[in-house]
Amino acid sequence: MISRAERLGNYAILSVFAVFALFPILTILQAAAGGGVEGFAQAWETGHFHTYLRTSLGVSAFVVVVSVTLSIMSGYAFGTMRFRGQNVLFYLFLLGIMMPSEAIAVPLYFDLRTLGLTDTFWSVALPQVALSVAFGTFWMRAYFRSSSRAIVEAARIDGASVWRTLWQVLVPPARPAIVTLILLVFMWTWNEFLIPLIMVTSEGLRTAPLGLAFFQGQYTSDFALLAAGSVIVATPVVIFYLFLQRHFIRGLLQGAVRE
């Protein structure tokens, strides 16, 4: 049992960290609110955020759908099957997690330029699919390895194919883990800055964080306008998280094997 003093001490420590975390956010919100609706409207028009948000939504949607689908299938293979070269292939996926995007951005640019893909939607989306699949495979493999083997064996005895076992037997109970993966991939993709910065030059292909950086360079002296732009860029992520937070928390806490 935790004593009252320990509980109060824990709350005090958490409160201090919460203040440090929330103070910059509250400062930005206060500055943005100081400009009123006119400030948001000016930031929206002069910063061309409607174009940047549309690009970010398109890239994020594509990366989430493709990478999560591939992660489910590869995680299922690594988590429930045994095949030659399994460990070597899985370590290659882990290498994708450990390798920072800064280390591969420059050679990746030259590779995509050779293929004629730079300054296109694909030069922004495809590298992020590859980076997300690396983590997604690790995430879904861990979930499928903790799933009940009895369910899988029962499905096979009933004559279910590998494909049907995955999508009709294992995926429905895995919804919290999948939703958590969706939210993580969406946030990482939305906040990605380096890859769009290197890969595109057209204004119409700039993502929201990249557009915000260019906007900041033009209006460094108007803090209220910059704050309004920051709130505009961050709002979709906040809304998406609030909508899925219950499943997100369940996915993080999920772990016990149920027979």
Image (tube, rainbow, N blue to C red):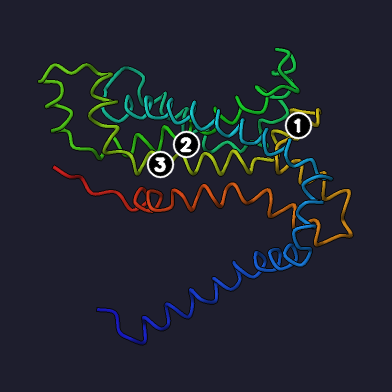
Q: Amino acid at mark 3?
A: Val
Q: Which mark is residue 179?
A: 3
Residue at point 57% right, 48% down?
237
Spatial CA distance of label 1 from label 2 is 23 Å
Could you tell which of marks 1 and 2 lies nearer the N-terminus? Answer: 2
Compared to residue 154, the image places residue 188 above or below, namely below
Q: Which residue corresponds to mark 1?
A: 198
Residue 33: quarter of image: bottom right
Residue 189: quarter of image: top right
Q: Nearer the viewer, residue 259 or 141?
A: 259
Residue at point 75% right, 58% down?
37
Q: Classify mark 3: helix, strand or loop.
A: helix
Q: Furthest-top residue in view? A: 115
Q: How many marks?
A: 3
Compared to residue 231, the image places residue 31 above or below, namely below
The crowd level at tag 1 (other Cα within 10 Å; few <14, some 14-19, many 20+) is: some
The crowd level at tag 3 (other Cα within 10 Å; few <14, some 14-19, many 20+) is: many
The crowd level at tag 2 (other Cα within 10 Å; few <14, some 14-19, many 20+) is: many
Task: Return the x and y of residue 3 as percentages of the image width and height.
Answer: 30, 84
